[in-house]
Amino acid sequence: MQQSVMSKTISIELRLLTWCLAHSHSEQSSATQMPFLITEEFDWTHFLDLANNRHRVIGPVFKSLKQVNPPWIPYEAWFQLRKKYKANTISLMKKIRELLNILNTLAKDGIQALPIKGPILGYQIYGDFLTRSCNDLDILLPKTQLLDALIILKSLDYKHIQVYRKTSVKQFEYYLNTAHHILLENKNTGIKVELHWRPFDVKIPSLEFDQLWENRRPLKIGEKTYPVCHPKDMLTLQIIHGEIHNWRRLFWLHDIYLLTANFSSRDWLELDARMKHLGMALGCNTIRQLLNKWYDHSPFGDSEPIFTPNSRSLFLTRLANTFICENDYKFFNKGILPKIKLHLGRLYLSDTISQQAQFLRNVIFPSDFLYINLPDRYFLFYFLFRPYFWFFRWFTDIEPVKKRLD
């Protein structure tokens, strides 16, 4: 990491965290290579919280520190680090078992399903399922098979935790056209599953399910083979996903760092061309700037940059750097200014007017039907009420949908 650039903006705990990530795949790293000193004022509790909760990188951080084995880590910090790593490993074992069970059950009923992100991405990056953390399980499927999949997951003890259960057919169809996933939770295990019929909140033709399914690759796990996204599609999905969330967690950036570690200039050119085709050309430029800053990794070495930064790309990069440095993830849900910046960053990401219009429609007229349940003959009133509910959600922490579900 470029110390002269970053030392004034990040804590010593975050600097150690990023050093661990940048050296997590280096067999020759040692504590003497650190460009900073760990003093008695170092807050190990805060460091563990950053690794485990804030940025969700407890796996690679633990493996990096275990390999380096620095003498200055207190016994209690080592104990807590191992404890959190073990808990994360157990959680991932449960989630991968649940994911395979869901995929097997869906396949038996003829439902096409692609696991995205989560344990499958961890396997593609690390070669195992137990290093990369994940909060929930993401499954992409055709919109025409969504209702059948919901019935199957209900039989597996899953319940909706976002969509009001008395939603009418008309409301549900509108939700399908404007949203992109439904969140469910297992009543017994608490494992959350997101069923996607689109990867993102806007329609991107080349990344719709049919195209991703056509490009799928087989992945053998045990005695069975499962369909997964093509590596190029997975990388594209991860870049757009990280950009949409302004790279608020380092584990998204770490994914890209590892996925592009062996990229040549030609590979980056191809990725640039693809992102431009998708209407999100700024994604590649932002990710290159972030990799250079946080990992001291320049994808093009000493060659001339392909993309000249403009005001939009510089804004997205500054926004990402600011959010990465935030210690408290709840910061993004407090106050109106962070939310405005998040939405502005999301708007800047899209190159096409069509995508920007879709995003603005989803922000101004969210289709979640959380607060009132009107008869279909009064459906027009939703468009009159939603600007009020938009501001109501921004200025309150009330989530009435959770109180209405069984």
Image (cartoon, rainbow, N blue to C red):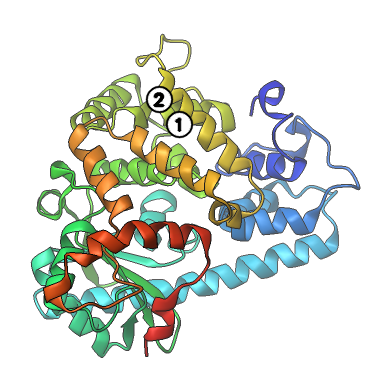
Mark 1 residue type: Leu
In the image shown, does 48 or 267 lie closer to the viewer?
48
Label placed on residue 158: none
- Which image quarter: residue 89? bottom right
Q: Is residue 212 above or below residue 240?
A: below
Q: 286 left or right of 8?
A: left
Other-residue count near label 2 (Cα within 10 Å), few / some / many at <14 / 14–19 / ≥20: some
Looking at the rendering, in which quadrant would you find the N terminus? top right
Residue shown at 53%/67% (left/top)? 397
Q: CA distance from mark 2 to mark 1?
A: 6 Å
Q: 173 left or right of 101?
A: left
Residue shown at 30%/71% (left/top)? 222
Mark 2 in CB contact with mark 1 (< 8 angstroms): yes
Q: Give the SS element for disc 1.
A: helix
Q: Which residue is mark 2?
A: 312
- Give residue 128's position: percent from left, percent from top: 43, 59
Residue shown at 47%/43% (left/top)? 340
Q: 392 left or right of 30?
A: left
Residue 134 at least partly seen: yes
Q: How many marks?
A: 2
- Give residue 142's position: percent from left, percent from top: 12, 63
Q: Give the SS element for disc 2.
A: helix
Mark 2 residue type: Arg
Q: Is residue 10 above or below residue 403?
A: above
Looking at the rendering, in which quadrant would you find the C terminus? bottom left
Residue shown at 29%/41% (left/top)? 236
Q: Which residue is mark 1?
A: 316
Residue 299 at least partly seen: no
Other-residue count near label 1 (Cα within 10 Å), few / some / many at <14 / 14–19 / ≥20: many
